[in-house]
């Protein structure tokens, strides 16, 4: 009967199977095998005792770890957990240093929450030549702490971990952590930090538990993870990354002993850079605030128009570019200087952008100086081109951690664009319309569906707003959604550029000076009395006539017939 129940549940829902199996078999003693993952259903009332038997004599260290999706679990050496012998979190592990002749290890798993928690647990063994993750811990509660501690906000994600120690035989004293910095001490160890991205828009528990298996042991981490940085022992064991809200990421650290060419893995840790349980600002697939969606949707509609018709409608093009420049500057100002809420800052940014766009159009109407207008258009395209370059792995080079080096390089690349196209401003304007206008569509899509392409400009904004973001690694996933959106972006940009080049090839490069045209027309109307426009009354008189007509419309009609006025 039990087999039939499990078979029926498995044919309909995998999660139901895991829950049934966990409940039936995880209520007490639970036997584990090395390097084998096992799903465990935990609750608050009955701790699960995890046991590994028949441990080989050449094994000196075992790291036992447990992972859950969003709810904390507690792992401890004793039934009654204490701060120095246990750890609580969604990704936690313990290091067991084996004694001579020891062949059995025991740990206890429990959920601190009243609800049941589905978790997965695994253990890995290491020999006397393998380094011990967290063996020189001086910061956290555990004596030997193999865990990676993660903190995040909307800007960046930070991980830190305890330094490792050299391996040693059973029964011996551990090597001193501060006895020297030579090749016979822990200072010869190296640390490689790896990153692994979960499938985009997949926040499910099943996806996480399955992909955690690819980032748990040394061979799997090296085969599946992306190595972002390597640290030596004399460097700080904390690293910053850019946060990707709504995108699952797994981090792990491999410690390597170059003398014996051996390695060991810490306990992997995962994050979505957002709360899965919060009612507001959670990890919902419909991303972003309502104000953000409205703002960027309108911005994308105007950008799509600019992409195909920007050069033909020159004033609209100038308004769009002025809106971008003034909007960016004002958002940075309101965010850094004031303590206003995000929605208020966005509204003020929209107002400032409207003013900036109108000012640029007014400048063109009054002075008609094409080169200055094209300088602003070229800088917009240049800053975007520079952001694309630093969006690539080039932006993670250590030399660009220095703000002075970064901003000088960024500005030089941005200035190259208007300088290169100074002899052909029409081509520059059409390129800016096609590329920047089409990218606004990408930003609008990012408000509804996750895409890494939005971080081309978002990472630049983060660096301007946050002083510590210069230390963050900005690697992002590039998966199926990104490929589709990239193809749409390229087609829009190329299509808009080709349409405008074909339409404008026989037209004048830029429209004539509006103020001169207006002034010439006014002088013509003054001097030429045969021109019907010469007899048009002044503006004030025309307004008075219109008001009189409106007043006459509402005046009561007098009755017909003769009327004799009263004589005084």
Image (tube, rainbow, N blue to C red):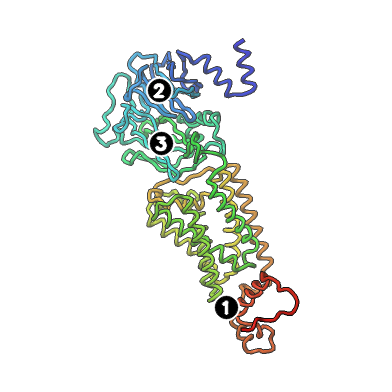
**Label ID, residue 75:** 2
Estimate the x, y position of residue 275 in percent, counting from the top left: 48, 36
Secondary structure category for the residue under label 3: strand
Q: In which quarter of the image is the N terminus?
A: top right
Check contact, mark 1 vs mark 2: CB within 8 A: no
**Label ID, residue 551:** none
CA distance for labels 1 and 3: 60 Å
Q: Name the image quarter holding residue 96.
A: top left
Pointer 1 residue: 515
CA distance for labels 1 and 2: 77 Å
Left or right: 444 with respect to 529? left
Q: Name the image quarter holding residue 104.
A: top left
Density class for disc 2 (Cα within 10 Å; few <14, some 14-19, many ≥20) is: many
At x 59%, y 62%, the residue is: 433
In the image, 564 versus 273, the foreground residue is: 564
Pointer 3 residue: 150
Give the label, 1 or 3, closer to the camera.
1
The outermost residue toward the left is 179
Secondary structure category for the residue under label 2: strand
């Amino acid at each position: 009967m039990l087999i039939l129940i499990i078979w029926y549940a498995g044919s309909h829902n995998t999660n139901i199977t895991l829950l049934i199996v966990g409940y039936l078999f995880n209520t007490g003693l639970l036997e584990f095998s090395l390097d084998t993952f096992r799903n465990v259903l935990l609750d608050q009332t009955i701790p699960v005792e995890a046991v590994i038997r028949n441990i080989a004599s050449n094994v000196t260290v075992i790291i036992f770890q447990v992972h859950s999706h969003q709810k904390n679990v507690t792992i401890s050496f004793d039934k009654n957990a204490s701060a120095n012998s246990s750890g609580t979190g969604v990704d936690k592990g313990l290091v067991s240093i084996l004694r001579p002749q020891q062949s059995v290890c025991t740990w206890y798993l429990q959920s601190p929450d009243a609800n049941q928690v589905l978790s997965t647990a695994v253990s890995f063994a290491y020999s006397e030549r393998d380094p011990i993750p967290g063996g020189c811990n001086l910061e956290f509660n555990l004596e030997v702490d193999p865990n990676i501690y993660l903190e995040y906000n909307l800007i960046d994600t930070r991980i830190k971990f305890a330094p490792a120690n050299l391996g040693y035989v059973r029964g011996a004293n551990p090597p001193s952590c501060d006895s020297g910095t030579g090749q016979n001490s822990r200072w010869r160890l190296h640390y490689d930090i790896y990153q692994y991205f979960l499938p985009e828009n997949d926040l499910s528990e099943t996806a996480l538990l399955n992909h955690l298996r690819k980032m748990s042991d040394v061979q799997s981490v090296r085969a599946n993870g992306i190595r972002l940085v390597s640290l030596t022992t004399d460097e700080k064991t904390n690293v910053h990354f850019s946060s990707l809200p709504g995108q699952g990421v797994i981090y792990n650290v491999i410690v390597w002993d170059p003398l014996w060419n051996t390695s060991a893995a810490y306990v992997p840790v995962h994050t979505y850079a957002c709360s899965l349980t919060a009612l507001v600002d959670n990890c919902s697939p419909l991303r972003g605030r309502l104000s953000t969606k409205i703002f960027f949707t309108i911005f994308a509609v105007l950008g799509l128009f600019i992409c195909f018709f920007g050069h033909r409608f020159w004033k609209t093009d100038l308004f769009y570019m002025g809106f971008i420049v003034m909007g960016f500057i004002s958002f940075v100002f309101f965010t850094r200087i004031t303590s206003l809420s995000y929605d208020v800052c966005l509204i003020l940014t929209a107002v400032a952008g409207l003013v900036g766009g109108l000012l640029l159009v007014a400048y063109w109407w009054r002075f008609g100086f094409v080169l200055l207008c094209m300088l602003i258009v070229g800088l917009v395209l240049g800053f975007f081109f520079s952001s694309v370059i630093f969006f690539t792995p080039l932006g993670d080079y250590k030399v660009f951690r220095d703000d002075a080096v970064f901003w000088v390089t960024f500005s030089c690349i941005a200035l190259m664009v208007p300088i290169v196209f100074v002899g052909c401003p029409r081509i520059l304007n059409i390129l800016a319309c096609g590329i920047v206008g089409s990218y606004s569509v990408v930003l609008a899509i990012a408000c509804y569906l996750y895409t890494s392409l939005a971080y081309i400009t978002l990472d630049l904004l983060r660096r301007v707003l946050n002083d510590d973001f210069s230390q963050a690694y900005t690697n992002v996933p590039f998966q199926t959604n990104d490929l589709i959106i990239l193809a749409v972006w390229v087609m829009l940009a190329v299509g808009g550029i080709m349409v405008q080049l074909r339409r404008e090839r026989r037209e004048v490069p830029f429209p004539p000076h509006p103020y001169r045209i207006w002034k010439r027309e006014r002088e013509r109307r003054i001097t030429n009395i045969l021109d019907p426009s010469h007899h048009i009354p002044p503006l004030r008189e025309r307004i008075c006539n219109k008001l009189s007509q409106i007043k006459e419309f509402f005046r009561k009609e007098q009755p017909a017939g003769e009327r004799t006025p009263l004589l005084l």
